[in-house]
Image: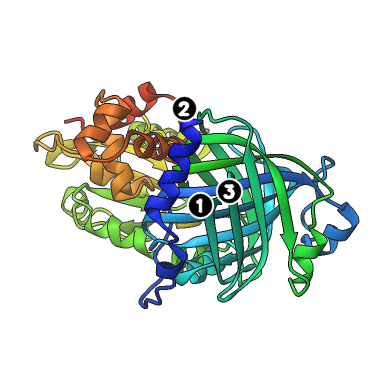
Amino acid sequence: MAETDKASRAIRHRGDLSAYLWQPTSGPLPLPPFHCRDVDLLYGVFTIDREAVEPFVPPELRIADSNLGCYAFYTVGAAFGLISYSQGFCAVVVDDHDSPDGSEGAFMLHSYVSGRAQEIIAELFDASAVPGKARVWSENGLYRASAGAIGHDFFGAAVRAKSGQLHQVDGTDLYLGRRRSGELVSYDISYSGTTLVAQTADYWIADDAPAVLKAARPVQHLYAQFLPGFSFGWGVPRPIGPAPAQEAFEGGRAFLELFSRSDRAALLVGNDGRIMHINPRARPLLGDDLAQGDALIKAFRPSERSELEAAMHHARSGTGRSVSQPVLLSRPDRPPIIAQATAVDPVIAGGGAVMVFLIDPSVSERGDATAALQLLGLTPAEARIAALVGRGYSPREASDALVITENTARSALRLIYSKLGIGRQSQLAKIVARLEAD
């Protein structure tokens, strides 16, 4: 039982975080992705009474025939993009929305979240997230958790480890929620760490708990697990159904600011082929030939236009956001420039938008790909990891170089691969090599 004792000591060492998590702050809401570490999580899967739960599921969704639900309670010791917080939630598995690793998606029925994280989650991911807190602790050989409003818990669970052996786990889950705006969204949660396989010993719901928690009362507990000190990341929420372009841009204001400040010349091109934005580094390369609102291809030779159109089409229709092959573009009275296209998340810039990077071969630009990787949707921390791993570092070597844990690096890599639409280090190496090419 040495591993079980180790997990219990880790909880005691971190202490009951709930007293410190209610931290009101102000200012603009940060935008995902978010990365969380030093997480203690209690998680269980059970069957539900389908007829009781259906009134709480949006009509656009259908409860899966498996009639599965899940509960989770966790505390976050440290978070990038979010302050430390805690959450307890209940969700139900739905059809036709699978995660990148093939597991079924789950719709969030109800949750309690502490601190400003509640405002962020309710606004961006799931309006069922209400102010509250969650606790996770060990007591008398059981791992226990509860959640509810501040000062009053509404539901909780206790699990017993089946053995003392910790198992490595990683993967990506998909969750769905309805925003305050009424928009239904899906988002990935990528995770990495160790788990103790367990069974649910107790699950309770207070008499005065919300009706949705009572409706989702477990019929039969199937399995549970306790994950001490693991890491996970929130992906960017994706609208289910068409999203107006203006709303997409409003949600991507931080991206546009980064785009403008980037030290790499780049254009944002809409689905119609017209230039939506030109950053300051790109303007000298284009001169007066092109302006915002112009069709990008008009300034180049016919043979080059077809190549550039093909590169942008590849970026739009490809399975992921890998960078296209370079295209050589002529300029009057000046050396040619090189263009490469990559797709942009539709949540950030509207459906069909692409980023076109411009490189002047006559000027030495070789260097760090970190800034360009951020333009592809990675956070600064993820971009640093991606740049190193893309140059051949192993996850362990990258974690040593960045002074982070190997679990954190591996968890971040899953998010990076998901965002870039790739699955192997060799594909990341190609992207980084092209972004750093002369």
> What residue is shown with label 1?
346
* Tag count: 3
Q: Nearer the viewer, residue 326 or 169?
A: 169
Residue 285 position, x and y percent, is 18, 48
**Side (left or right) of 233 relative to 110:** left
Q: Which SS class for mark 2?
A: loop
Q: Residues within 10 Å of mark 3 (few under 14, many from 20)?
A: few
Badges 2 and 1: C-beta atoms under 8 Å apart?
A: no
The alpha-carbon separation of the residues under discs 3 and 1 comes to 50 Å
Earlier-in-chain disc, 3 versus 1: 3
Q: Residue at x 52, y 41 (%)?
A: 227
Earlier-in-chain disc, 2 versus 1: 1
Q: Nearer the viewer, residue 425 or 138?
A: 138
Which of the two marks, 2 or 1, is nearer to us in this view?
Answer: 2
Q: Amino acid at mark 2?
A: Gly
The C terminus - image quarter: top left
The residue positioned farthest toward the right in the image shown: 51
Q: Amino acid at mark 1?
A: Pro
Q: Residue at x 85, y 41 (%)?
A: 65
The alpha-carbon separation of the residues under discs 2 and 3 comes to 43 Å
Q: Nearer the viewer, residue 145 or 307?
A: 145
> What residue is shown with label 3?
140
Residue 260 position, x and y percent, is 26, 59
Q: Residues within 10 Å of mark 2 (few under 14, many from 20)?
A: some
The alpha-carbon separation of the residues under discs 2 and 1 comes to 20 Å
Residue 170 position, x and y percent, is 51, 33
